[in-house]
Amino acid sequence: MTEKADDAARMAAADLGEVADYFNETFAKFGATAKGLDWNGEATQLLSMEQCCKLFGDKTAFSLIDLGCGYAPFLDYLRKRKYEPDYLGIDISEPMIEEARKRFSGDRRARFEVGALPTEEADFVVASGIFNLRFDRSDEDWRAYILRTLDAMNVAAVEGFAFNCLTKYSDADRMRPDLFYSDPCWLFDHCKQYYSRNVALLHDYEKYEFTIIVRR
Ligand SMILES: C[S@@+](CC[C@H](N)C(=O)[O-])C[C@H]1O[C@@H](n2cnc3c(N)ncnc32)[C@H](O)[C@@H]1O
């Protein structure tokens, strides 16, 4: 980790206490289910995972950091398919990480950490569902948080990374003030300018969300 990324990690963890409390509560109420992670349902959760998997291309064996892993449903998803990752799951919620450790206690290729940013390098880094809930943070602060996190993902990811955000092209009457709706064009441009020439913007699936994939 660079000194800059290390500073960002400390700042991000300190800033996200309210978000961690929120997910601790949803987990206490609904347990290791899609609702426990505040998804509308399993189908929408899986649809986001499907997009993230496009990052891997033909590869099936690789190291992976899952930032905001929750109780690690993405690892279930990957193991049920053709993928065999060396997996590090990171989450700001301690109960989620405890649950993930229990669920994968027999899996020697899965590790878990409480944290807010990648702590080592991996072939790929994925973050699904971590840029949405901003409570009363200003647009400016939340954008800065997103960029700090993306900078750290970019440093950690050897081959590439993927993330998703709620889209500003959502139906206005269904938008909530405590959620952040990102501009996909702004993030696409940022990734192209600062991270890589190879950037894909996926905004063609049935969700008020887009996924960005950055490859080296
Ligand atoms: C909507 S859930 C998504 C969980 C999982 N990625 C999935 O696809 O089902 C968001 C999770 O990210 C965690 N989280 C939010 N911001 C984070 C951050 N900056 N670093 C690590 N975890 C974060 C929350 O505690 C929560 O468990």
Image (cartoon, rainbow, N blue to C red):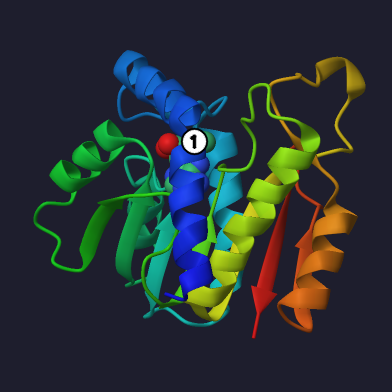
Q: In terms of secondary structure, where does tag 1 sit?
A: loop
Residue 12 picture location, percent across and down: 50, 47
Question: Which quadrant holds residue 66?
Answer: bottom left
Residue found at the far left of this picture: 106
**The one of 170 and 42 positioned closer to us in this rendering:** 170
Instruction: List the residue tagged with mark 1.
Output: 16
Identify the residue at horizontal 60%, vertical 46% (top origin).
Answer: 47
Q: Nearer the viewer, residue 195 or 148?
A: 148
Categorize mark 1 by other alpha carbons within 10 Å: few (<14), some (14-19), many (20+): some
Res. 168 in view: yes
Image quarter of residue 28: top left
Q: Amino acid at mark 1?
A: Leu
Q: Quadrant of residue 188?
A: bottom right
**Left or right: where does residue 15 sit relative to residue 65?**
right
Instruction: Kindly identify the residue that appears in the image at 54 percent across and 39 percent down.
Output: 45
Q: Is residue 83 left or right of residue 97?
A: right
Residue pictured at 59% horizontal, 72% vertical: 154
Q: Looking at the rendering, in which quadrant would you find the C terminus?
A: bottom right
Front-most of 88 and 2? 2
**Percent position of residue 172, x then y:** 90, 22
The verdict on label 1 being within 8 Å of ligand 1 is yes
Expressed as whole percent of the image width and height from the top left, the position of residue 189 reads 86, 66
- Could you tell me which residue is drawn at 36 percent across and 72 percent down? 120
**Where the N terminus falls, by quadrant?**
bottom left
The answer to whether residue 106 is above or below residue 56 is: above
Counting the numbered discs, the total is 1
Q: Is residue 35 visible?
A: no
Where residue 161 appears, as percent x and y from the top left, is 58, 69
